[in-house]
Image (tube, rainbow, N blue to C red):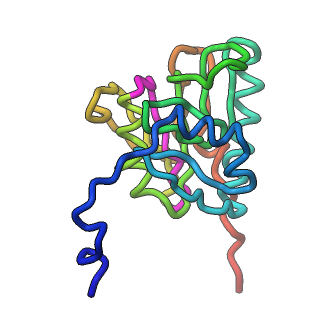
Amino acid sequence: MNAADGPLSTAKIRPLRRVEYDRLVDLGVFDGEPIELIQGRLVIVSPQGEPHAFCVTRLNKILVRALGDAAEVRPQQPLAASDVSEPEPDIAVVPAGDYLDAHPRTAHLVIEVSVSSLREDRQVKGPIYAAAGVTEYWIVDVGGQCIEVYSDPGTEGYAGVIRHGLHAVLTVPGFPDVTVRVRDVMPPSPAPTG
């Protein structure tokens, strides 16, 4: 018998709503568990290796310095993207505020660093961020040594995508004076051996 033949194969599954998830988080139900709410399901967040942590740290430092008090830079914090999704993007640049009463619902920019999650970042998270009205979505493709910039959000996803290589300079949406050089966020290549 395979999993599709089990008793749940014909059962209707009700997604967990974001307000329910937030209440469970407030009660401490998931303390210590690396999870996020994606399309009504609890998804385990992959552990971060050194290249991933390097990129997130560099992006956070660059953006905090450049934006100052003009916007909030939220590393790995919840974004109330929809009634059934509350991802925790690697970086979110959101309007200035303290967000004590609720997580932000949208952002100027969301960035995901992808070492092994490129397909999920493109196909699952991209449409979630677009539907939430996130102006731009960047995927730092560590293996490809580039940043994919997704723009023109809509209910089905982003209409535009451009891959920018190491020599590109990107502008943070809504902040024309704030730029990020792709090469400045990539981990250094290992030194050649032999």
Residue toward you, 32 or 174: 32
List x then y, in percent, for residue 148: 44, 43
List x then y, in percent, for residue 190: 69, 69
The residue at the point 30 percent across, 35 percent down is 157
In this rendering, the count of numbered labels is 0
* Residue 132 versus residue 7 in the image, above or below: above
Would residue 4 be found to the left or right of residue 180 on screen?
left
Range of the magenta residues? 132-143
The residue at the point 61 percent across, 15 percent down is 95
Q: Quadrant of residue 115?
A: bottom right
* Residue 124 versus residue 71 in the image, above or below: below
* Residue 17 versus residue 132 in the image, above or below: below
Residue toward you, 8 or 118: 8
Residue 69, magenta (yes or no): no
* Residue 96 versus residue 141 in the image, above or below: above
The residue at the point 59 percent across, 41 percent down is 88
List x then y, in percent, for residue 12: 27, 54
Would residue 115 be found to the left or right of residue 51 on screen?
left
| Quarter of the image that includes the N terminus | bottom left
The residue at the point 56 percent across, 32 percent down is 79
Residue toward you, 157 or 187: 157
